[in-house]
Amino acid sequence: MMSEVHPREILICTIAKLLDGVRHVAVGASSPIPAAGAMLLRALRQQAGEKGPRISILGSVEHNFFTNGSAELFDCAGQGRIDAFCLGGGQIDGRGNVNLVGTGDYPQTPVRWPGSFGSAYLYYVVPRVILFREEHTPRALVEKVDFISTPGVSNDGVYRSGGPIALLTSKALFRFDKTRPGFDLQSIHPGHDLAGIKDATGFQFAHESQPEQTALPNPQTLALLRGRVYDEVAETYPDFAAQMRREIERPLSHAS
Amino acid sequence: MMSEVHPREILICTIAKLLDGVRHVAVGASSPIPAAGAMLLRALRQQAGEKGPRISILGSVEHNFFTNGSAELFDCAGQGRIDAFCLGGGQIDGRGNVNLVGTGDYPQTPVRWPGSFGSAYLYYVVPRVILFREEHTPRALVEKVDFISTPGVSNDGVYRSGGPIALLTSKALFRFDKTRPGFDLQSIHPGHDLAGIKDATGFQFAHESQPEQTALPNPQTLALLRGRVYDEVAETYPDFAAQMRREIERPLSHAS
Amino acid sequence: MVSDLRALAKYVEPGVRLALPVDYAGVSMAMTRPIIERNARNLDLVCVPTGGLQVDQLIGAGLVRSVETSAVLLGEAGGAPRFNAAVKDGAIALKDATCPAIHAGLMAAQKGSPFMPMRGLIGSDLLHHRSDWRVIDNPLADGGDPIVLIPAIKPDITIFHAPMADRFGNVWIGRRRELAAMAYASATTLVTVERIVDESLLASEMSAAGALPALYVTEVAVAPKGAWPYGLWGEYPTDTTEILRYARAARSAVGFADYMTNAQMEPA
Amino acid sequence: MVSDLRALAKYVEPGVRLALPVDYAGVSMAMTRPIIERNARNLDLVCVPTGGLQVDQLIGAGLVRSVETSAVLLGEAGGAPRFNAAVKDGAIALKDATCPAIHAGLMAAQKGSPFMPMRGLIGSDLLHHRSDWRVIDNPLADGGDPIVLIPAIKPDITIFHAPMADRFGNVWIGRRRELAAMAYASATTLVTVERIVDESLLASEMSAAGALPALYVTEVAVAPKGAWPYGLWGEYPTDTTEILRYARAARSAVGFADYMTNAQMEPA
């Protein structure tokens, strides 16, 4: 059973669970795994006779509901019409701060990433932000980011209707506790263990002594993903869908 | 010669002169005389081989350059792209204040007019505002308006890139002196005299002892007005153009 | 998505803040009588940015508590008789505004901001009577430079009429982009249309450019000639005769009641 | 109105503030070389809201003094090599922003307002490095409630590429309305298009809905495939191979110079 599920399929299914209940999720044009998670949730809800979430794919000409230019996503979020968003980051730290700008001292950062995009707004006003970074290393998950593109928490009195709820990597799922603030290890993906997670994580996190394993999709969900959902994913992310379909034909390794 | 010029044609030609040099003038959908003045200026400039002003007719589906809804006029004015505008008023007072709301104590005004429209913005930011009111009576031109929809002048330090330059009525043309502030009688239309203007005006104004008569259009200008310009006017204001053409066929009275 | 006008009118609960478009932008006159039949009172109207026949009729029917507007008039037919009478009687609260202030308030809501700054207004009596507007010194200037802040206008409901919607709930508004601004700012948006088309308006770049996405549209109902006696851009002209007929009738409360009882609900 | 690309490039004087669109919105790549040939230095770029190939090439050519942007990248081809090198060398001043802050600054200019308020940003290091942004307590709240004010962004020049213009200078921008926002905010707007059409885009409601009026357009020039190697919506896809080829070449200053000298200026 285990060997039948691709590690990225666990990520997709986990994202679908994290998104459950949202009416509208926005995903980036270069974020096939979050998009697939949102599409899986929609397929599951529609199978259950419900409407399922609206999915806005940013930067896509074909799959966008917007007609008012590139400001509309942010307006829409400001209106409270976007419930969930997936955000990556060059560095993510233990307080949920995200760095999309670069390493070292700003502005002459030795390593420069593209920039903060809309994160310094969306992270504040989208209720359910899922931090998603496949790379789970001390380089990516740091104690303290070198530059706060957007902060995990805000001081009392600062308008903040949204923020991080979880961090998903190739190795594990963390929940964000904004009261502490900090991450709680929720579950470990198959093939990984707590010691390895600790080694790979640059920040401290809370955890059970015996963390759970991340749940695998049941056969029905997996069938839906591999049928209808990959077909839908292929419309926007043809390379990704093709790659997934190639890899699930082959024996899989669970190494990250 | 005199009897050949309709009193409203003097108004139209006077407006064309007041607008001379503007690049873009906005006129109201129910303002045929200002529109005709702007169209006459455009025709004169084009006859001289120049481009002539752009004319935006508000609320007109056919003759508007706007594609961003009813906010665009105000945005456009705020950007400094509208040089001139004609503004009426239920009451206009000697400081250039305009009342478009009603007479008596607000809010339960015994006489209620429609409202201030965009005046409380455009009057501040359009450089050349021509106050235009055909009715020249103590009821319309008052010492002090009952309600300031928009003020003629602003205190030092208040952002104000525009304001009134003139007041044109069926009887006379006034220039606005914003330093005083107040109106200077510039010229009296044919058929009227200073005593009559004083009787008909509710506010004090400066004047020469022997005010000039408002200049009549020369024959070339009149011919252009009665030919090409009325044709253009007729596209947007068919009733007005037809009325003018009927009335210039008949002997004219110069009574207001 | 398609439902009938009475079903749409049920959204208009007593005390809601209701945004309505200017007479040339697509007024859903077809919704006026269903709203009056539904008899939801204490409505707070927001005219974007001015009001006309629909506003006058809702006021005449006694449903309106307050009107925020830059003007109310019947176009060529002159003043709005039931509005003017209600002003004189003090029967409605007035929030007199100027057009760009209404747009600024909606824009603040569109942007999720608490306010928008706006030039003009200082020295106008409009400002004196608007305790919700605030003057501050421009924090980006070196001192002085007063500027007015207009708070966000967040209508509960927007109602308008448009030429067409598709069966996915996208609505074609063309260049009447204030209709989009109203919908962005509002919790609920109810739209009547001349017709429903099969193909998605978002399917071609040409039609998408003038489309309000279904995301902002709560309900759509078909109402042919639904703006009548107003016109609808690109579709049919205003029936000025009918508006003049209303203007004459509505000079008195009795005449208004008579008009509303007996007048046809649809164009002849 | 129609003039050639070099004539358009003459508007780009040294030291101007130049607004450029995001890679999928219609980048006038056809103007990149004429601008570089014209050699106007000390340009202040405003990326709306992010930059790509054109920004990287202008930086590589040494024309850029500062960049205000939410990001610079080459899409699937990854980071922008000349931008990244210039950052590392301190060769350009950075005004790092976030997308809605760029939109807010342009909106302030569009509205003739000195600033727009914006939620978010507080606690971000972006704010610490932007002395032009200001935090105030929301004057409409009862106290506290800090909010950021973004000053108006008024570019001297906006340059973009669109599918078509008419012979009256109206430009069809479809749903890419940030192009209109850029033009509203800018003193001068230069547009390249795939083609000029005879009939006015304002003549039909359908095409008018996606048109930027000539009022905001300074010059239009025809440049077929003018966005290449970027794509243009509804017209042609991005040539990813060419962008990857650039990304590899521009890793070094020498490789960049070589690419700019030898690479074709037009699609094969």
Image (cartoon, coloured by chain):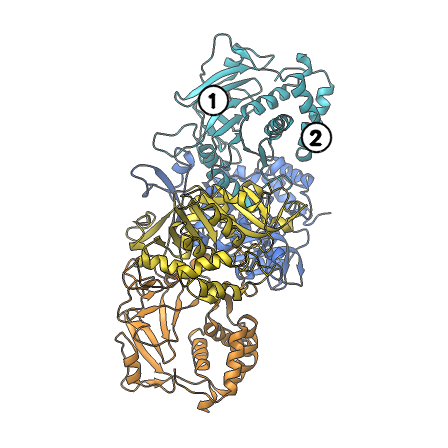
Chain colours: A cyan, B orange, C yellow, D blue
| Residue lying at 27% horizontally and 76% vertically, measured from the top left | B205
> Who is closer to the viewer here, C62 or A43?
C62
Query: Residue at label 2?
Result: A231
Q: Quadrant of the N terminus of chain A?
A: top right
- Residue A241 visible, this orientation: yes
Amino acid type, label 2 = Asp
Would you place residue C265 above or below residue A180 in this image? below
Q: Is residue D153 left or right of residue A23?
A: left
What's the distance in space between the residues labelled 2 and 1, CA to CA?
37 Å
Seen in the image, is C266 located left or right of residue B156? right
Q: Secondary structure at mark 2?
A: helix
Q: Residues within 10 Å of mark 1 (few under 14, many from 20)?
A: many
Dot label at residue D180:
none
Q: Nearer the viewer, mark 2 or mark 1?
A: 2
Disc number for residue A142: 1
Q: Is residue D45 visible?
A: no
Q: Is residue B135 above or below residue A61?
A: below
The chain containing the residue under callout 1 comes to: A
Query: Residue A68: x, y in percent?
Result: 55, 47
Q: Where does residue D7 sit, x and y in percent of width and height? A: 59, 61
Query: Measured along the vertical axis of the image, is residue B75 above or below residue C156?
Result: below
Callout 1, which amino acid?
Answer: Val
